[in-house]
Image (cartoon, rainbow, N blue to C red):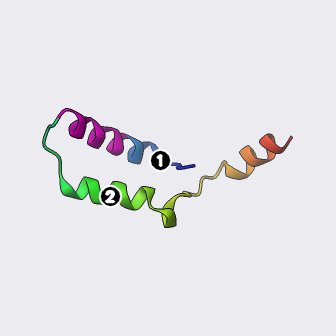
Amino acid sequence: MIVLTDEQANAVHRLLTCVLLNEPYQISDVEDALVWISPENRQILCPFDSLWSKNLAE
């Protein structure tokens, strides 16, 4: 599962939209997105993680 912040999700959405519409985009946006979804960074800590885990377990 990939968990992104709202800001990251918006950036990925903009990037994918530009790619699909063949519009210009910045290579730095591609680099950022690759870092966010790389195996080493697939989990972004969230203050609600423990609460969600607890509720899911119940």
Q: Which mark is residue 29?
A: none
Give whichever of discs 1 and 2 has the lower sequence position: 1
For the point 21% across and 38% down, which residue is it? 18
Residue 11, placed above or below residue 36: above
Q: Is residue 18 magenta?
A: yes
Q: Please, which residue is most extreme toward the left here?
A: 24
Q: Please, which residue is most extreme toward the top here?
A: 21
Does 31 sit left or right of 40 as displayed? left
Location of residue 38 in the rendering, given as x and y in whole percent from the top left corner: 44, 61
Magenta stretch: helix, strand or loop mostly: helix
Query: In the rendered structure, which amino acid carries the disc numbered 2?
Result: Asp
Residue at the disc numbered 1:
5
Does 49 sit left or right of 26 as displayed? right
Does 47 sit left or right of 58 as displayed? left
Location of residue 48 in the rendering, given as x and y in whole percent from the top left corner: 66, 48
Q: Secondary structure at mark 2?
A: helix
Q: Which mark is residue 32?
A: 2
Assess whether mark 2 and mark 1 are in contact (beta carbons under 8 angstroms). no
Q: Secondary structure at mark 1?
A: loop
For the point 52% across and 58% down, which residue is it? 42
Task: Give the magenta part as a residue range.
Answer: 10-21
Quadrant that contains the C terminus:
top right
